[in-house]
Image (cartoon, helix red, strand yellow):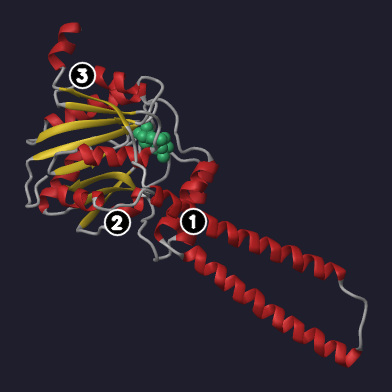
Amino acid sequence: MNSERSYKSLSVILPGYNEAEAIRHTIEETDAVLRSLPLKCEIIVVDDGSIDGTAESALKAAHATPLKVIRFSRNFGKEAAMTAGLEAASGDAVVIMDSDGQHPPSFILEFVKHWREGYDVVYAKRASRGTDSWLRRSLSKLYYRIAFSGTTFIEPNAGDFRLMSSTVVKAILSLPEKTRFMKGLFNWVGFKKLAIDYTPRERTAGETKFGSIRHLFRFGILGIMSFSAFPLRMISRIGFLVAGSSVIYGLYIMIRTLCFGIDVPGWATLTVALTLLSGIQLISIGVLGEYIGLIFTEVKNRPLYIVEKVTQQQSNLERQREAA
Ligand code: UDP
Ligand code: MG
């Protein structure tokens, strides 16, 4: 990758997990867009351990653009797939796009235009969350409000659909962490950026992999923990609050006993206070545990992903035409 500015080549990365049906359309649509660009392009598909033949299906798609398919040995998650794509990309700029057809490939033209104007990052920002369920929309709104009020690097409604210059890609790849919360890393590195509004389309085929609330919850927690010590600070704040109120309550009981003598003991109060406090303690230990878990992952220093096979394919358009 060049360090000085060059606008000659473009790599498009498509991470895909069980997208056999959708990825074919996506590649063909992307290929059509790339052909209209005066750039040397490549498409990199990262098959994240699919069990439905996504890699094979990708190789069957008609394309004039050189296609590289990296197949993982198992499912390592989208963050790892995107990292593998970035590592394999050789372009002066890189576009990351979902392979399910939700990200319109025509936006690449817009991205490239702004990149050439001098922006290092051009990213798509959801103008509406129309394709998400009401619950998912509300939860995501609440999450961003609570977790990221100006303290971290995550921007609401901006996803992974973006163009980055090779300088930015190099910066992202230089970050050593194993827990890769890409939405945050993208912003953490900085650089001159521009947002473009877009409305995600419906999936071409298949189902979302991030649909369950449990999964989103874990992902959300990871986002907060990878970028802030806010939960740890909360623990000490709660500690001070609880200790402070106990002192005040203690003084109140002491004065009341001195003035009015001893009355019937408050078992209920005692029990409630006791269970509440043990609850808070357990949650606090849990928060510490989560951070220790993250440290554990870092310390083990395992590779982010394992590649089973890399297939490189030049244009297969002629072959497709002959077959038809
Ligand atoms: N994906 C992946 N690995 C995973 C989960 C998802 O590579 O473990 C890919 C998936 O194939 C798709 C993109 O990440 O191209 C976004 O996933 P999905 O469409 O399921 O998420 P949503 O758009 O519903 O948020
Ligand atoms: Mg999707």
User: Which numbered tag is attached to residue 292?
Assistant: 1
Q: Quadrant of residue 95?
A: top left
> Which kind of residue does numbered mark 1 sit on?
Ile
Question: From this viewpoint, is residue 142 visible?
Answer: no
If the image is split into quadrants, where does the C terminus sit?
top left
In space, the residues marked 2 and 3 are separated at their CA atoms by 35 Å
Classify mark 3 as within 8 Å of ligand 1 or not, answering yes or no.
no
- The first of marks 3 and 1 along the sequence is 3
In space, the residues marked 3 and 1 are separated at their CA atoms by 47 Å
> Which kind of residue does numbered mark 2 sit on?
Asn
Classify mark 2 as within 8 Å of ligand 1 or not, answering yes or no.
no
Q: Is 128 located above or below residue 144 in the figure?
A: above
| Residue at the spot 13% in from the left edge and 33% down from the top edge | 41
Residue located beneath label 2 in the image: 187
In space, the residues marked 1 and 2 are separated at their CA atoms by 25 Å
> Residue 254 at what x, y percent from top left?
81, 87
Q: Is 194 located above or below residue 104 in the figure?
A: below
| Residue at the spot 51% in from the left edge and 63% down from the top edge | 231
- The first of marks 1 and 2 along the sequence is 2
Q: On the picture, is 119 further left or further right than 302?
A: left
Q: Nearer the viewer, mark 1 or mark 2?
A: 1
> Residue 193 at what x, y percent from top left?
22, 56
Q: Nearer the viewer, mark 2 or mark 3?
A: 2
- The one of 117 and 79 positioned closer to us in this rendering: 79
- The one of 282 and 213 positioned closer to us in this rendering: 282
Q: On the picture, is 145 further left or further right than 116?
A: right
> Which kind of residue does numbered mark 3 sit on?
Ala
| Residue at the spot 68% in from the left edge and 79% down from the top edge | 245
Residue located beneath label 3 in the image: 62
